[in-house]
Amino acid sequence: MAQFDITGIVRALGGVRDEWRSAQKRSREPGGREFPSREALAQIVEGLKGALFPMRLGPPDLRVESEDYYVAHQLDTALHALLGQARLELQYGHRHAPLPAEQVERQAREAVQAFAEALPGTRRLLDSDVLAAYHGDPAAGSVDEVLLCYPGVLSMIHHRLAHALYRLGLPLSARIIAELAHGQTGIDIHPGARIGAGFFIDHGTGVVIGETAEIGERVRIYQAVTLGAKRFPADADGTLKKGLPRHPVVEDDVVIYAGATILGRVTIGAGAVVGGNVWITDDVPRGASVTQASLHAALPPR
């Protein structure tokens, strides 16, 4: 078996880590992980999927008469694991001004309890998303096919869970959950985005929805749609300002076709239709239809 001389490499990597930790003012005290685990959150989400949809996303040998027992077990396991991740995130978020241990514990428990109590509402929202996909796609053979196979529905399961955590003050855990779906589906939804009931992403690959986007009910979008920011305001030091509304508002019953790019804090009015491959940086009136041809016609003559 080949032998590699790695002693110097290990020492050099340790030096690089020390440089980073010093620059970031990170603790060098002995201890475990300081922030939430991607692997742990992936397991938590899988458990929550089973609890939300036991006969479809639960184990293959589950019987209807055992549903409640299985759901109780999954919830107990997932919520205790989530509590551990919430503690880590709260400690990490206050690493420069640590909170008392009892305050971290109280906030973590309150957040996870509120998250758990919201799960029935989350399930209802996801049911509306599944029905929107089934009714909106003539190729869909059943609601079960939609739930099991459609990447847009998978991304919304992750988003509905992540958005709840985001609103409860656990944005890093929420972002990790969102990025797990992004990696699997190619659909990038920031957990801060507010999305109403009956949302359908058809095909989905390349969809981007920014942090401050607001989407109404019964909205349908297709692949490669971007709801993005037009500009990024900075302070006097050149540091980007965080959290400012900078993404589109999409009202109820809007359809946005493939490849459309909508940038900035613009409003797409209720019932509007946005055609494929258009670029929009201004408001669109209610009920309007915007296509490449209509945009070209609106340009001033040269």
Image (spheres, grey):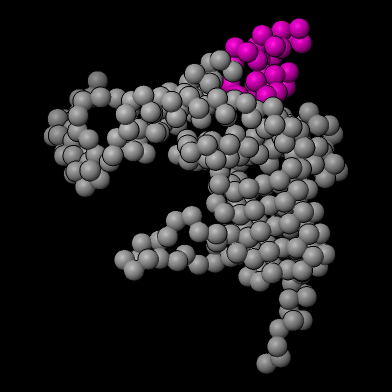
Pinpoint residue 161: horizontal percent, then vertical percent.
Answer: 60, 34
Q: Main secondary structure of the magenta part?
A: helix
Q: Is residue 98 left or right of residue 53?
A: left
Question: Does the rendering let one see residue 113?
Answer: yes
x 24%, y 20%: residue: 1
Magenta span: 46-74
Image coordinates for residue 113, horizontal then vertical, percent? 55, 25
Q: Position of residue 96 (x, y in %)?
A: 27, 41
Give residue 132's quadrant in the image: top right
The structure residue drawn at horizontal position 81% and vertical position 68%, both measured from the top left corner, is: 288
In the foreground, 18 or 138 = 18
Image label count: 0
Percent position (x, y) of residue 100?
Answer: 32, 29
Residue under the image location 78 percent in, 75 percent down: 294
- State whether residue 289 is above or below residue 152: below
Q: Quadrant of residue 236?
A: bottom left
- Can the viewer see residue 289? no
Query: For the point 23% across and 43% down, which residue is it?
Result: 25
Residue 118 sits above or below residue 155 on the image: above
Residue 131 among those drawn in magenta = no
Q: Nearer the viewer, residue 42 or 288?
A: 288
